[in-house]
Amino acid sequence: MIDGVLFDKLEFIARIVRGNDKPFGGIQLVLSGDFCQLPPVPDRKGGIAIPSVFAFDAESWSRCIKRPIILSKVFRQKDQDFVDMLNAMRFGQLEEQTIQAFKKLSRLVVYHDGIGPTQL
Protein backbone atom coordinates (compact mmCIF):
# COMPACT_ATOMS: atom_id res chain seq x y z
CA MET A 1 0.00 0.00 0.00
CA ILE A 2 1.40 3.38 -0.96
CA ASP A 3 1.66 5.91 1.83
CA GLY A 4 -0.68 8.91 1.61
CA VAL A 5 2.18 11.39 1.97
CA LEU A 6 3.97 9.77 -0.99
CA PHE A 7 0.69 9.77 -2.96
CA ASP A 8 0.44 13.55 -2.41
CA LYS A 9 4.07 14.10 -3.41
CA LEU A 10 3.71 12.06 -6.61
CA GLU A 11 0.50 13.89 -7.48
CA PHE A 12 2.23 17.25 -7.01
CA ILE A 13 5.30 16.23 -9.04
CA ALA A 14 3.13 14.91 -11.89
CA ARG A 15 1.31 18.26 -12.14
CA ILE A 16 4.60 20.18 -12.20
CA VAL A 17 6.34 17.88 -14.71
CA ARG A 18 3.38 17.83 -17.07
CA GLY A 19 2.61 21.53 -16.65
CA ASN A 20 -1.04 20.66 -16.07
CA ASP A 21 -3.19 21.56 -13.05
CA LYS A 22 -5.44 18.52 -13.44
CA PRO A 23 -4.95 15.77 -10.80
CA PHE A 24 -1.70 13.90 -11.49
CA GLY A 25 -1.12 16.32 -14.36
CA GLY A 26 -3.91 14.69 -16.35
CA ILE A 27 -2.43 11.18 -16.12
CA GLN A 28 -5.15 8.53 -15.97
CA LEU A 29 -4.76 6.39 -12.86
CA VAL A 30 -5.74 2.81 -12.29
CA LEU A 31 -5.20 1.98 -8.63
CA SER A 32 -5.85 -1.38 -7.08
CA GLY A 33 -5.34 -2.91 -3.71
CA ASP A 34 -6.97 -4.23 -0.60
CA PHE A 35 -7.55 -1.18 1.54
CA CYS A 36 -8.28 -3.37 4.55
CA GLN A 37 -4.67 -4.55 4.72
CA LEU A 38 -1.99 -3.34 7.09
CA PRO A 39 -1.08 0.34 6.96
CA PRO A 40 2.02 1.49 5.07
CA VAL A 41 5.34 1.10 6.88
CA PRO A 42 6.03 4.40 8.66
CA ASP A 43 9.02 6.54 7.71
CA ARG A 44 11.55 7.69 10.26
CA LYS A 45 12.94 11.17 10.72
CA GLY A 46 15.83 11.54 13.11
CA GLY A 47 15.13 8.05 14.46
CA ILE A 48 11.53 8.92 15.29
CA ALA A 49 8.71 7.09 13.48
CA ILE A 50 6.43 9.35 11.45
CA PRO A 51 2.86 8.00 11.56
CA SER A 52 1.84 6.41 8.28
CA VAL A 53 -1.11 7.69 6.28
CA PHE A 54 -3.26 5.47 4.09
CA ALA A 55 -3.42 6.54 0.43
CA PHE A 56 -7.17 7.16 0.77
CA ASP A 57 -6.40 9.63 3.59
CA ALA A 58 -4.04 11.66 1.38
CA GLU A 59 -4.96 15.32 0.91
CA SER A 60 -5.16 14.88 -2.87
CA TRP A 61 -7.13 11.61 -2.86
CA SER A 62 -10.61 13.13 -3.26
CA ARG A 63 -9.40 15.38 -6.13
CA CYS A 64 -7.80 12.43 -7.93
CA ILE A 65 -10.29 9.62 -7.35
CA LYS A 66 -13.76 10.58 -8.54
CA ARG A 67 -15.43 7.22 -9.20
CA PRO A 68 -13.97 4.39 -7.16
CA ILE A 69 -15.06 0.94 -8.22
CA ILE A 70 -15.27 -1.50 -5.36
CA LEU A 71 -14.90 -5.15 -6.23
CA SER A 72 -17.01 -7.17 -3.82
CA LYS A 73 -17.26 -10.68 -5.27
CA VAL A 74 -14.98 -13.16 -3.52
CA PHE A 75 -13.39 -15.68 -5.87
CA ARG A 76 -10.83 -17.38 -3.64
CA GLN A 77 -13.31 -18.77 -1.09
CA LYS A 78 -16.49 -20.70 -1.86
CA ASP A 79 -17.78 -21.17 1.70
CA GLN A 80 -20.00 -18.12 2.38
CA ASP A 81 -19.81 -18.60 6.17
CA PHE A 82 -16.01 -18.46 5.96
CA VAL A 83 -16.19 -15.40 3.68
CA ASP A 84 -18.41 -13.71 6.27
CA MET A 85 -15.90 -14.57 9.01
CA LEU A 86 -13.02 -13.10 6.99
CA ASN A 87 -14.99 -9.92 6.28
CA ALA A 88 -15.84 -9.53 9.96
CA MET A 89 -12.12 -9.74 10.73
CA ARG A 90 -11.17 -7.31 7.96
CA PHE A 91 -13.60 -4.69 9.25
CA GLY A 92 -12.83 -5.28 12.95
CA GLN A 93 -16.33 -6.51 13.75
CA LEU A 94 -15.56 -9.87 15.33
CA GLU A 95 -18.15 -11.42 17.60
CA GLU A 96 -17.24 -14.07 20.14
CA GLN A 97 -18.86 -16.78 17.99
CA THR A 98 -16.60 -15.85 15.05
CA ILE A 99 -13.50 -15.74 17.26
CA GLN A 100 -14.27 -19.24 18.52
CA ALA A 101 -14.83 -20.48 14.96
CA PHE A 102 -11.39 -19.15 13.97
CA LYS A 103 -9.81 -20.80 17.02
CA LYS A 104 -11.31 -24.15 15.96
CA LEU A 105 -9.34 -23.86 12.71
CA SER A 106 -6.05 -23.86 14.64
CA ARG A 107 -3.96 -26.97 14.07
CA LEU A 108 -0.39 -28.17 14.06
CA VAL A 109 1.03 -28.02 10.55
CA VAL A 110 3.83 -30.41 9.63
CA TYR A 111 6.20 -29.46 6.82
CA HIS A 112 7.71 -32.56 5.28
CA ASP A 113 10.32 -30.63 3.31
CA GLY A 114 11.79 -29.15 6.49
CA ILE A 115 11.04 -25.60 5.35
CA GLY A 116 8.49 -23.84 7.52
CA PRO A 117 7.02 -20.38 7.03
CA THR A 118 8.58 -17.31 8.58
CA GLN A 119 6.69 -16.25 11.67
CA LEU A 120 6.33 -12.56 12.43
Image (cartoon, helix red, strand yellow):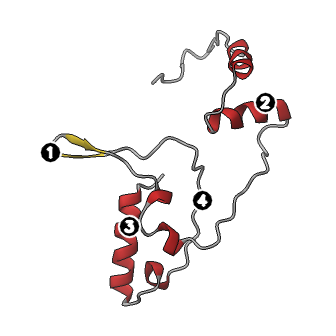
Separation of residues labelled 4 and 3 (CA atoms):
17 Å
Circle 1 residues within 10 Å: few <14, some 14–19, many ≥20? few
In the rendered structure, are the residues bearing label 3 and label 2 in contact, judged by CB atoms less than 8 Å apart?
Answer: no
In the rendered structure, are the residues bearing label 4 and label 1 in contact, judged by CB atoms less than 8 Å apart?
Answer: no
SS category of the residue bearing label 1: loop
Query: Label 2 sits on what residue type?
Result: Phe
Residue 117 position (above or below residue 34): above
Name the residue tied to disc 1: 46
Residue 75 position (above or below residue 59): above
Nearer the N terminus, badge 4 or badge 1?
Answer: 4
Q: Residue at x 66, y 27 (%)?
A: 94
Q: Residue furthest bottom?
A: 19
Residue 32, numbered circle: 4
Name the residue tied to disc 3: 8
Nearer the N terminus, badge 4 or badge 3?
Answer: 3
Separation of residues labelled 4 and 2 (CA atoms):
24 Å
Circle 2 residues within 10 Å: few <14, some 14–19, many ≥20? some
The answer to which image quadrant residue 29 occupies is bottom right
SS category of the residue bearing label 4: loop
Q: Position of 119 compared to 33: left or right?
A: left
Can residue 79 be seen in the rendering of this structure?
Answer: no
Q: Residue at x 84, y 35 (%)?
A: 80
Q: Residue at x 44, y 55 (%)?
A: 2
Nearer the N terminus, badge 1 or badge 2?
Answer: 1
Name the residue tied to disc 2: 82
